Image (cartoon, helix red, strand yellow):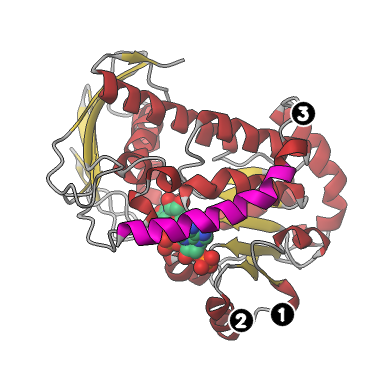
Amino acid sequence: MKMQKYHIDQNRRKFLKGFSFALGATAFGMPLLSLASDQAGITRNKSKRYDSTSSGVKKLGVALVGLGRYSTNQLAPALQETEKCYLSGIVTGTPSKAGLWQKKYGISEKNMYNYQTMDQIRDNPDIDIIYIVLPNGMHAEYTIKAAETGKHVICEKPMATSVKDCQQMIDACNRNHVKLSIGYRLHFEPHHQRVMELGQQELYGPVKKIEAADSFVFQRDPSSWRLDKELAGGGPLMDLGIYCVQGAIYTLGQEPIAVTANFDEVTRPDYFDEVEQSIKWQMEFPDGAVADCSSSYNDSASRLYGKAERGWWELQPSFGYGGIRGRTSDGPMNLPNVNQQARQMDAFATCILEDKQSRVPGEMGLRDVRILMAIYEAARTGNKVKIG
Ligand code: NDP
């Protein structure tokens, strides 16, 4: 069954790669521009177009690329709650979805694209932001394609399946003078923002220890792209463990300097013959803090814990779309659960309107992919891998 789907994916990928090859020839040859200076200059040029929106008159149009689970169940509903942007277009390879979405969300015929026609978005004033919600292995190709239309881009996590791809995505956005943001929704979530304050402002003294786990039992179709090395880039580490890496970094406000890791035993080889089933890793930070992390497709966990000199905090569940609960050594956090995706997309729209850099830019996505690759190397070799 897996082979059969893989075959279909391969054909689809070949077709998709065919038309991006020509794109790559022009997209990859330019030097990296300084993000700060470049984006400031560029969006100043573009800002004329948004003058009226800064007074709240016009909302920015978002086109979702890839109408899978996340687009369907989270992003499209969130775009009904956003204040500064709205769902204006779609890009899909599945004609039946196009019809359903058009009906459900009243999307205009001229704002509907497939992967072959997506480059025509450059001529569509209804679309300001292109949001890439495709399998991980397709992020680079389609982010670059989106940047080439001159529209701002959000790319889902993990940013890509290699550091090189991440850099090419950043280069393409810089060269086309568009902003790039990663779908890191938890930066806009109150419990996680509280953890950032507690850790980074050392409200309980310096942080000594972090524990993070994000896992679920994979029971979906074994032909899923998430089990395909080329399309997913890896297993639960790429999909879920990235939240543990993120959580540790924003607890501390520091980046890890070294990692050790090991893969756990594969107990379901019918599913996990290309990507890992489970992985554990440890990250060391410059000030001596250590983060113990794990991620699995054969377990249930959602926890971010920090221990500082004079107290501790814990989010559990921590990484989902809602239902996050937090407590500290002084008691419950009593913070609201919010629509994370709506906040995330509104924050990016605000960046565009006010010509500011995203709080979760492409550089952050690249940083995290570099760390994920170091974790894989540590698990493969059994060695401690230094980062940076
Ligand atoms: P799905 O498998 O549900 O959807 C992916 C969609 O991509 C498909 O429905 C299809 O849309 C399109 N697609 C195009 N080519 C292929 C291909 N070769 N194989 C499979 N799908 C293809 O995935 P998700 O929506 O769960 O995940 C998409 C991305 O979003 C991933 O990068 C994932 O990591 C990220 N994500 C982020 C989350 C977050 O919390 N930030 C949560 C969940 C996912 P169509 O039919 O329209 O062409």
Q: CA distance from mark 2 to mark 1?
A: 8 Å
Q: Nearer the viewer, residue 339 or 174?
A: 174
Q: Is mark 1 within 8 Å of ligand 1?
A: no
For the record, the magenta segment spans 2-23
Query: Where is mark 2, residue-wise?
Result: 102
Q: CA distance from mark 2 to mark 3?
A: 38 Å
Quadrant position of residue 382: top left
Q: Nearer the viewer, residue 258 or 316?
A: 258
Quadrant position of residue 224: bottom left
Q: N-terminal of the two: label 2 or label 3?
A: 3
Residue drawn where x is 41% and y is 40% of the image: 233
- Residue 21 belongs to magenta span: yes
- Residue 288 belongs to magenta span: no
Q: Is residue 385 above or below residue 217?
A: above
Question: Looking at numbered disc 3 in the image, what kind of residue is underneath it?
Answer: Met
Predominant secondary structure in magenta? helix
Question: Looking at numbered disc 1 in the image, what kind of residue is underneath it?
Answer: Glu
Q: Residues within 10 Å of mark 3 (few under 14, many from 20)?
A: few
Q: Residues within 10 Å of mark 2 (few under 14, many from 20)?
A: some
Query: Where is mark 1, residue-wise?
Result: 109
Marker disc for residue 183:
none
Q: Is residue 250 above or below residue 287?
A: below
Q: Nearer the viewer, residue 337 or 242?
A: 242
